[in-house]
Structure formats: C-alpha cells, structure tokens
Image (cartoon, grey):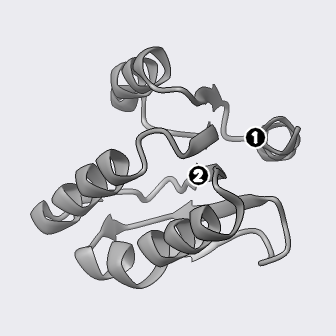
C-alpha cells in the first residue's frame, strides 16, 4: 500500500509504503502524483518511508516501478529513502550514480531529517 505523508502544497512528495505493493498502488497513487508534479514543476523531489511490514512488490507493480523510473529518469531531483530495506541499497546507489538526481538513504527514525534534505 502507498499513502501520502506530505500535503499537496509541500515541495516534496512524501509516501509511506507498507505491506505488498500492487500495480493499483502505482497506477492510482504514485504514478499520477509524480506525473502531475513533473508537469507543473519540471522536476520532482520524493521521500519514501518504508514500514516494517513491507513485503515487496507484485510482478506488475515491479514493472510499473521500472516504467516510472525510466519515464522520469532525469526528472527526479532528490529522492530520500527512509528505512528502506537493506537489499535496496545497491539499486539506490546505482540510480544515484547514473541519474542526474541525488538519492540518499536515511535510518527509519530520521524522517524529519530526510524531509529537510529533500526539500533543500
């Protein structure tokens, strides 16, 4: 499940991820929010906070995640990852190295620090 953690007027799109991510989560929440922000501002700053009960992605959700990343490859200005599973470290470092945006991982208790970094 994906839910918002920031208001619509916040310069950072904040999301909370829990359970198993579905294609519906991407198609109804994440993709439209990012598409809308990129259309209105040209770039997007994102904060994603993982819950302890995160169980991974459905196959279709994994494809949506890849499609979203490729569609907006150069549109991500900053991506803050809060409490992300350790196995995502490799992918976040890879994205940070080859994209124009910055990616930074934060411990699960550092939400406010991550939000400040993403908004700066």
Residue at 34% across / 79% down in the picture? Answer: 27
Between 22 and 43, the residue placed more toward the observer is: 43
Q: Secondary structure at mark 2?
A: strand
Distance between the alpha carbons at the discs numbered 1 and 2: 13 Å
Residue at 77% across / 41% down in the picture? Answer: 118
- The image shows residue 32 at horizontal and vertical percentages of 47, 77
Residue sticking out furthest to the top? 97
Confirm whether residue 109 shows in the render. Answer: yes
| Depicted 28 relative to depicted 30: above or below | below
Residue at 49% across / 22% down in the picture? Answer: 96
- The image shows residue 21 at horizontal and vertical percentages of 32, 67
Dividing the picture into quarters, in which one does residue 78 lie? top right
Between 109 and 103, the residue placed more toward the observer is: 103
| Depicted 54 relative to depicted 40: above or below | above
Between 46 and 110, the residue placed more toward the observer is: 46
Q: Residues within 10 Å of mark 2 (few under 14, many from 20)?
A: many
Confirm whether residue 1 shows in the render. Answer: no
Q: Secondary structure at mark 1?
A: loop
- The image shows residue 12 at horizontal and vertical percentages of 75, 56
Residue at 63% across / 27% down in the picture? Answer: 104
The numbered mark, 1 or 2, whose residue comes first in the sequence reads: 2
| Depicted 49 relative to depicted 40: above or below | above
Quadrant for the C terminus in the image: top right
Q: Residues within 10 Å of mark 1 (few under 14, many from 20)?
A: few
Query: What residue did someone put label 2 on?
Result: 48
Q: Disc number at residue 109?
A: 1
């Amino acid at each position: 499940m994906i839910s918002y953690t920031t208001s619509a007027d916040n310069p950072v799109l904040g999301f909370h991820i829990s359970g198993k991510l579905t294609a519906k989560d991407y198609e109804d929440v994440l993709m439209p929010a990012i598409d809308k922000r990129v259309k209105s501002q040209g770039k997007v700053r994102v904060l994603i906070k993982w819950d302890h009960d995160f169980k991974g992605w459905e196959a279709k959700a994994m494809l949506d995640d890849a499609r979203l990343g490729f569609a907006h490859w150069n549109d991500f200005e900053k991506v803050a990852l809060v409490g992300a599973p350790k196995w995502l470290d490799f992918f976040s470092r890879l994205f940070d190295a080859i994209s124009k945006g910055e990616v930074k991982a934060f411990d699960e208790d550092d939400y406010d620090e991550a939000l400040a970094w993403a908004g700066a």
